[in-house]
Image (spheres, rainbow, N blue to C red):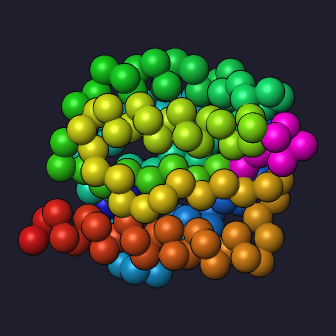
Amino acid sequence: MKALVVYATITGNNEDVADLVTESLEDRDVDVEMTEISLADPADFEDVDICVVCPYTYDEGALPDEGMDFYEDLQEEELTGKVYGVAGSGDTFYGDDFCKAVDEFSKVLADTGATKGSENVHVNLAPAEDDVKKLDQFAAELVKKAQALND
C-alpha cells in the first residue's frame, strides 16, 4: 500500500503533523512519500492508495499561499477509489476560522470522488501528546479504510 503526505508549513508545526502521520503510516507497513505542497502535484495522488493533506490555516481562515495552485489543481482531479485524510494546524485564537484550511481541503478531496478515511484532525499550534494519539488513530483509520476498499 502506498501513501502521499503533502504538507504546508511556516512555523514547522505542520511539518511535525505530517511527520507524525508519515511515521504512523510507515509503522503500518505503508510505503509513504512526504512532500512540501509547493513541490507537489495533485496528479501524484493518482499513483497512491492513501492521499493525505496537512495544511495550516493562516490568519482569519486563509489557506496557505504556497498551496493555492495545489488547491486549485486538486479540484480538477478524479480520485475515485482512493482514500483521503486531512490533518493540520491552526490557532484557536481565530475562533470559527480555527483550522478552516483543513476543512476546505477535505471538501475538495471529497469532490474528487475519493473516500474519506478518517475524520479531519485539527491541531492547535504544535502537536501535543493528545494530538499524537489522534494522528496515530487517524493513520490507523486511513489504512483500515484503504484495505477495505482494496478487498
Is residue 16 in sight in this rendering?
yes
Q: Judge left or right: residue 140 versus residue 38.
A: left
Q: In this view, which residue lies farthest toward the front?
A: 96
Q: Nearer the viewer, residue 108 or 44?
A: 108
Is residue 56 in sight in this rendering?
no
What range of the chain is rendered magenta? Answer: 89-95
Q: Quadrant of residue 94?
A: top right
The spot of residue 137 in percent (x, y) is 51, 76
Q: Is residue 94 magenta?
A: yes
Residue at left offset 32%, top offset 32%: 111
Q: Nearer the viewer, residue 46 or 110?
A: 110
In the image, is residue 103 above or below residue 4? above
Q: Judge left or right: residue 10 versus residue 5.
A: right
The spot of residue 29 in percent (x, y) is 36, 78
Residue at left offset 54%, top offset 33%: 104
In the image, is residue 116 above or below residue 149? above
The spot of residue 98 in percent (x, y) is 75, 42
Q: Is residue 96 magenta?
A: no
Q: Looking at the figure, which quarter contains the C terminus? A: bottom left
In the image, is residue 113 above or below residue 26? above
Q: Looking at the figure, which quarter contains the N terminus? A: bottom left
Q: How many marks?
A: 0
Q: In this view, which residue lies farthest toward the left?
A: 151
Q: Judge left or right: residue 50 versus residue 56.
A: left
Residue at left offset 50%, top offset 68%: 138
The spot of residue 20 in percent (x, y) is 62, 68
Residue at left offset 28%, top offset 51%: 115
Q: Judge left or right: residue 120 versus residue 140.
A: right
